[in-house]
Amino acid sequence: MKKLIDRLGISIEHLKCLEEVFIENNEEYARIETLLSSEDFNPFYIEMARELYGGGKQPRGNIKLARQMILGDVIEYIFTGRVFYYAAKSEDNFSKFLKLIFYSVNQILLFDTITVNPQIRKLYIEKLEEKIDHEILYEKAGDNEIANELKENEVLIWTSAWTSQIDSFVDSILPKTLGCPKELIVFAELIRLKKGNIIPLLLIQRIFGDKNPIAPPDFLIAKENKEMYGIEVGYAKEGQSREFSIRTSIPTFAVDLKNNMHNRCPKCGENILYCDPVIEAYSNGTLNDKLNENGKYTYKGCEHFNEGQCKFSNYYGRVNGTSFNGNTLDVNKNRHYHVNCVSSDTYTFRRQENSIYEDHIDKFFAQIPEIEGIGNI
């Protein structure tokens, strides 16, 4: 996403240049800015500005902060608000746009690596401290102390030392690394299916009307027969969806990714990503032709598999041994793993030890975008 973010940064610098020149050279412009920064208005001005960058994660209290949501909104604006103009120009552009979404999703999932890689986490926190005013970066009380703690220790997620305070802080410095990939993939699938006119509402937090404002669903689908549907990504917002449907008479339903997507490999702690062949097949419309009778994209005959060394191939099952945080793996629980993390491991079934690689080589598969509920459209 580097070029996209760089260009967005240039847009911000451009606006800052415009503002600085007019503050210095236009009396009325400077007067308005002085008015907005006055004692009477400044407290509200600051509160409004926090909706563009809130230094932490604090959903309750007098000062509410939601940095992770803001960062996620900025990324989603790039794809749904601007770059889609490129995609709309031709089928070839559209294919490249889908490819960009999936590679960017992989990059967002990789951001989560700071939960299991103390070195990258330390470098990232230090980079934030170098670039952002500490009063804004650590606007939430106590975050400065948590940041210093994380720079000095090697605490990992899924351990008792990973407190709720640490979890909240780490979450706040990342762009909603679970929600944002889900929403971008659902967006890609909706526009790929072409079952109606897709209206993204990801950036609209509230809809104003004749009563109190309501939260919209993530997408609207307007069909040629004048039917309209709301689509919410995730199953945990039934109350919000119900209120929207009651107030607008627009039926709303939820969709979500199936269970084998965006899982954390228990052996290394990193998220499982989409591989190059899947991204290529999805973007050119041939993915369904490459799935087996069970709807899986297997690595049988794939030139990238490399005898299990492919960093994208998946194993779903049991594993004997320990996880990335030193805990003993539950030998009775099936989980998703990177094949190259467990290819030399075994599992026990009916008191017999089995080789993961030798017994399952034909069943290793690649993660593909599967969305539950989208068949309702």
Image: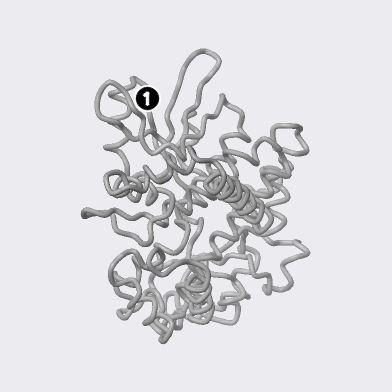
Depth check: give the residue in front, 15 or 121. 15
Q: Amino acid at mark 1?
A: Pro
Q: Is residue 294 visible?
A: no
| Total marks in image | 1
Mark 1 crowdedness (10 Å alpha carbons): few <14, some 14-19, many ≥20: some
Judged left or right of residue 304, residue 367 is: left
Q: Residue at x 49, y 45 (%)?
A: 183
> Circle 1 is placed at which residue position?
251
Note whether 149 is above or below 365 in the view shown. below
Question: Percent x, y for residue 72?
Answer: 48, 52
Q: Residue at x 66, y 48 (%)?
A: 291
Question: Percent x, y for residue 222?
Answer: 51, 22
Quarter-wise, where is residue 350 in the image? Answer: bottom left
Depth check: give the residue in front, 302 or 152. 152
Q: Residue at x 63, y 65 (%)?
A: 312
Question: Percent x, y for residue 362?
Answer: 65, 64
**Residue found farthest to the top:** 225
Judged left or right of residue 168, residue 272 is: right
> In the rendered view of the protein, which quadrant contains the N terminus?
bottom right
Q: Is residue 27 visible?
A: yes
